Image: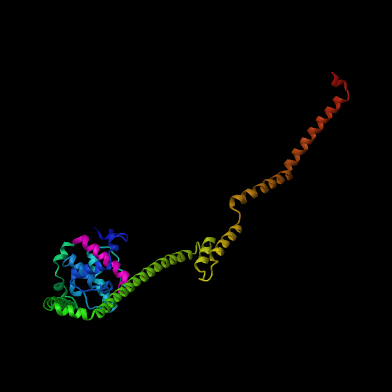
Amino acid sequence: MAATKIGMMDAAYFVGRGEILAWINSTLQLNLSKVEEAASGAVQCQLMDAVHPGMVPMHKVNFDAKNEYEMIQNYKVLQDVFNKLKITKHIEVNKLVKGRPLDNLEFMQWMKRYCDSVNSSMMKNYNALERRDSCKGGKEVNKRVTTLQASSKTSSTTSSRTNATHPSRKNDAASANPPQKASKLSTAAEVDAYDQQITEMKLFVDSLEKERDYYYSKLRDIEILCQRPEIEHLPIVEAIQRILYSSYEDSSGMEEAQLMISQKEQQLPLSPILENSAEHPKQETQKRKIISRSPESENLFCLNASQKQRLSDISDVQLCGSPLTNY
């Protein structure tokens, strides 16, 4: 599966922290207890080396990175590998180096999904200790891992021998001090429960901060758009700015914005079409006045009046009983 097709709704982003840590520790022979312990970027570089052998310059990877500038160097190595493989995954270095649990968990979820889809069978035969020896601080990490593994094996062997050779003594001690063992177990369980609650709260806070940053960036984009000279004087833009800049205590921002829009609509001038229709009768009246005042119109009026006078004279002659009319 191509790396560019791994979206946020992919099943990879629903993998739990325990499964991610078990996968990292088994693949790279490490003993990580928290996902944010991989914030230095060295673990991600070695995972890419396990999937694509020889592609990562392991001598440039620093497993002893403590400061942010040292971690950034590891992420630069990882970004170079992404560029060589034409992987378009964006690495949010500024968030990862802060050691935030949610950001590191999401990136490791993506890493697992990518490694499983590309070449998961190759990772089973990967010699993580040998490849890590060439890294800065890699030998110290290998020593710690080897010591922890040896101590865990020794303790398990010793406990099994003790149980086999002195079963009666174990039973006597257990019967002698049952309250003490119960208190120790309860204390350990409470500590684990508190650690889990703290981790969940950190993840919840990180998710809230991420959501806050997302909506803030959207509001900032709207503010920049409203400040453009060609639209900043529009009523709707002024109303949006009124809402954006209203204080937390001011709950009337929306009402004032709506009032501003209604007032602006009432103050809008007539449209060109309405103005032309209003001026049209005035122009017709002026034309009629000009025509009535011209010399040609006066002559025409006199001619019509003389013709009307002649017709009236003829009618008078007919009514008076003239012999000519009787004929």
> Image check: 226 left or right of 74?
right
Along the viewing direction, whichever of 72 and 13 lies nearer the viewer: 13
At 17% across and 74% down in the image, what residue appears?
Answer: 132
Q: Position of residue 161 (x, y in %)?
A: 12, 77
| Quadrant the N terminus occupies | bottom left
> Image check: 23 left or right of 258?
left
Instruction: Give the magenta range.
Output: 95-119
Q: Position of residue 144 (x, y in %)?
A: 18, 79
| Image position of 183 with respect to 268: above or below | below
Tell me where residue 6 sits by quadrant: bottom left
Q: Is residue 111 magenta?
A: yes
Taking the image as drawn, is residue 67 in sight? yes
| Quadrant the C terminus occupies | top right
Taking the image as drawn, is residue 139 in sight? no
Along the viewing direction, whichever of 286 and 92 lies nearer the viewer: 92
> Image check: 220 left or right of 37?
right
At 28% across and 76% down in the image, what residue appears?
Answer: 186
Along the viewing direction, whichever of 157 and 210 lies nearer the viewer: 157
Give the mark count: 0
Along the viewing direction, whichever of 310 and 264 lies nearer the viewer: 264
| Residue that protrudes farthest toward the top in the picture | 327
User: Magenta residues: mostly which secondary structure?
Assistant: helix
Q: Position of residue 174 (x, y in %)?
A: 20, 78
| Image position of 277 with respect to 100: above or below | above
Q: Is residue 231 magenta?
A: no
